[in-house]
Image (cartoon, grey):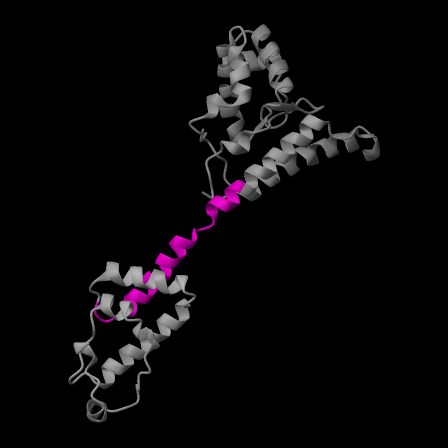
């Protein structure tokens, strides 16, 4: 799914209702109503990636939100006030409502971290446009309140977490490198033993390039002596670290036999 498309589903973690905000919300009298209203606002805002505006031009008022959520106007007004106090929403001067943490629940993509940054930038840009449209000077805009700063810090933390998640682990990289090398090895037997030997070699600072070059030289050595020389079991070759051998890959088969290197027997 590319970032220029709209997202139409929520991806909630299993501890979503155990967050401080949801616990406080649902512990209130008739808190289940506010929880239900919040879910409906989340879903309705997905079509505009977290922003609530009717047809992207008209702000939702209490009556309109009551109609689309099927709750009373009184419940909506109280819910909106609570959501603002809990920093779950941000209402701009033009009436646009932003669900502040919606980017944590939009279906994940490979550019999720960038999308979260863009979302925060979008809110700030719309604020700036409102200031410029009203003729106010930018330097008259009050500084962000401490709660807003805390929200931004939390968003940055989430971004860093997502970036770390997308990084492949060292173990995965090692196994991926081995898979590439194993494709070139001529006798694919004892793979488990070969992989263990390769991991041990990497731990001892042996590079992937060293092993890969050793396999290529060994293949050429076999080709030059194919009339009598057979490949060694993969596991044994790796266990004996045969990438360190000096293969005389330019010798002819007859000349090589004179050296007495019958390595398929070792």
Rendered-image quadrant of the N terminus: top left
Task: Judge whether 71 appears above or below 104 on screen.
Answer: above
Magenta segment's dominant SS is helix
> Residue at 51% across / 17% down in the picture?
23
> Residue at 27% across / 82% down in the picture?
221
Residue 174 on the magenta span: yes
User: In this rendering, does residue 88 appear at all?
Assistant: yes
Please tell me in which quadrant of the rendered image residue 100 appears.
top right
Rendered-image quadrant of the C terminus: bottom left
Task: Judge whether 89 appears above or below 256 on screen.
Answer: above
Q: Position of residue 112 (x, y in %)?
A: 52, 41
Q: Position of residue 217 (x, y in %)?
A: 32, 79
Task: Judge whether 248 appears above or below 6 on screen.
Answer: below
Q: Position of residue 63 (x, y in %)?
A: 59, 11
* Along the line of sight, the residue nearer the viewer: 14 or 10: 14
> Residue at 47% across / 21% down in the picture?
17
* Along the line of sight, the residue nearer the viewer: 88 or 67: 88
Q: Position of residue 88 (x, y in %)?
A: 59, 23
Count the numbered circles shown: 0
User: In this rendering, does residue 37 appear at all?
Assistant: no
Does residue 244 appear to the left or right of 157 in the view shown?
left
Does residue 36 appear to the left or right of 246 in the view shown?
right
Does residue 160 appear to the left or right of 129 in the view shown?
left
Residue 201 on the magenta span: no
**Magenta segment boundaries in residue numbering:** 161-187
> Residue at 51% across / 7% down in the picture?
30
Please tell me in which quadrant of the rendered image residue 14 appears.
top left
Task: Judge whether 233 appears above or below 29 on screen.
Answer: below
């Amino acid at each position: 799914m590319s970032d220029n498309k709209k997202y139409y589903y929520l991806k909630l973690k299993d501890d979503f209702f155990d967050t401080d905000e949801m616990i406080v919300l649902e512990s209130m009298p008739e808190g289940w109503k506010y929880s239900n209203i919040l879910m409906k606002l989340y879903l309705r805002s997905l079509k505009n990636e977290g922003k609530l505006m009717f047809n992207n031009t008209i702000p939702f008022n209490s009556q309109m939100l009551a109609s689309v959520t099927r709750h009373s106007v009184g419940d909506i007004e109280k819910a909106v006030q609570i959501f603002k106090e809990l920093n779950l929403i941000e209402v701009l001067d033009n009436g646009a409502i932003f669900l502040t943490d919606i980017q944590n629940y939009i279906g994940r993509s490979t550019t999720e971290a960038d999308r979260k940054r863009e979302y925060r930038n979008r809110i700030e840009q719309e604020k700036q446009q409102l200031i410029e449209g009203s003729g106010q000077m930018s330097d008259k805009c009050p500084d962000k309140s401490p709660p807003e700063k805390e929200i931004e810090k939390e968003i940055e933390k989430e971004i860093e977490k997502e970036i770390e998640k997308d990084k492949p682990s060292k173990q995965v990289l090692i196994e991926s490198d081995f898979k590439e090398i194993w494709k070139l090895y001529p006798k694919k037997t004892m793979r488990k033993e070969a992989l263990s030997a390769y991991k041990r070699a990497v731990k001892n600072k042996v590079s992937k390039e060293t092993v890969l070059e050793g396999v290529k030289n060994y293949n050429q050595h076999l080709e030059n002596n194919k009339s009598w020389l057979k490949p060694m079991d993969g596991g044994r070759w790796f266990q004996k670290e045969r990438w360190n051998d000096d293969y005389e890959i330019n010798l002819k088969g007859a000349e090589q036999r004179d050296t007495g290197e019958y390595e398929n027997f070792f």
